[in-house]
Amino acid sequence: MKKYHGAFIKNDREIACLREANRMVANILDAIGDVVAPGLTTQRFEEIARDMCATYNVKPAFLGYCGYPYATCCSVNEQVVHGFPSSRLLQEGDIVSVDMGVVFEGFVGDAARTFPVGEVSEEARRLMQVTEESLYIGIDKARAGNDVYDIGAAVQEYVEAAGFNVVRRFVGHGVGSRMHEKPEVPNFKPAMRGLTLQNGMVIAIEPMVTAGTYEVDILPDKWTAVTRDGKWAAHFEHSVAITHDGPRILSISDRGLNRHTV
């Protein structure tokens, strides 16, 4: 693969592999979304993901990555990202974010969604809606000639205008033969300009939005990030190719583009 300032430029075959990897991830997230309900454990999502990876004959991208012990990240309520699937029972009114990745023919698919558990409060519904809407606003800026700065600035402006905050500690990233490649893709307006986007780049855009402070803490498990004030967070992510025809979302399932709250 060619490089531009450290970021890989993918060819058509490589983007096709990334599209297939992301299709599988989106299908897995669809299947998980189908069963989300009060009384279910987040461990059930892990089982579904692993079973479907076995069916697809692909490797879960997260499992073992930097020592992470699961195939999915399942983050409930005040958990922002990297929550462990567990025997915790979901309760009516909770929200749960599921982040998932697979490796297909050496290329990584990566996407995330936040699901309501039964009937949720109006604030929780708005939090999910604004987060998902901000993702698509960021995607619209993922065009050759724009800076990754433009993505983050658009996301932050929209989220803060709606009365929420974007997490600064974690950002999106390039994705390809490795899960985290250059460039970093912030969900906020950085202090400095970043990389100019080029056709052939593939990036994961993933706003993490909070109802309160954007500050987070890491739990003793050394992975789970929670909001410092205990208020809830939502997380949506797509992998996106930069093309001559504009941004192309790769993480689309066999059902089509699944927009949950938008």
Image: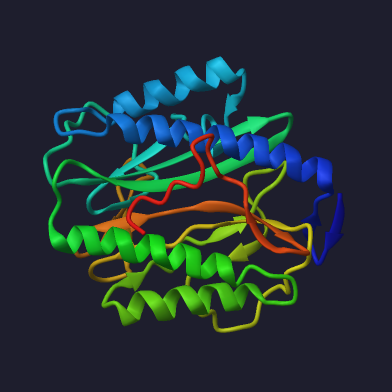
Q: Position of residue 180 (x, y in %)?
A: 63, 50
Describe residue 87's horizontal placement relative to residue 199 as left or right. left
User: x, y (%) of residue 145?
Assistant: 74, 76
- Relative depth, front residue between 218 and 146: 146
**In the figure, 117 relative to 45: above or below?**
below
Residue 153 image position (x, y, % from top left): 51, 79
Residue 208 visible = no
Q: Position of residue 21 (x, y in %)?
A: 63, 35
Q: In terms of depth relative to the viewer, which is nearer, 65 or 221?
A: 65
Q: Is residue 4 left or right of residue 181?
A: right
Which residue sits at x=22%, y=50%? Answer: 77
Q: Is residue 96 above or below residue 61?
A: below
Q: Is residue 200 left or right of residue 94?
A: right
- Is residue 235 among what the camera can see? yes
Q: Residue at x 81, y 67 (%)?
A: 5
Q: Nearer the viewer, residue 2 or 253?
A: 253
Q: Report the number of numbered marks.
A: 0
Residue positioned 70% across, 46% down in the render: 176
Name the quadrant containing residue 30: top left
Instruction: Give the image's coloring scheme.
Output: rainbow
Looking at the figure, which quarter contains the C terminus? bottom left
Query: Outermost residue, front direction?
Result: 255
Establish if 57 lies above or below 152.
Answer: above
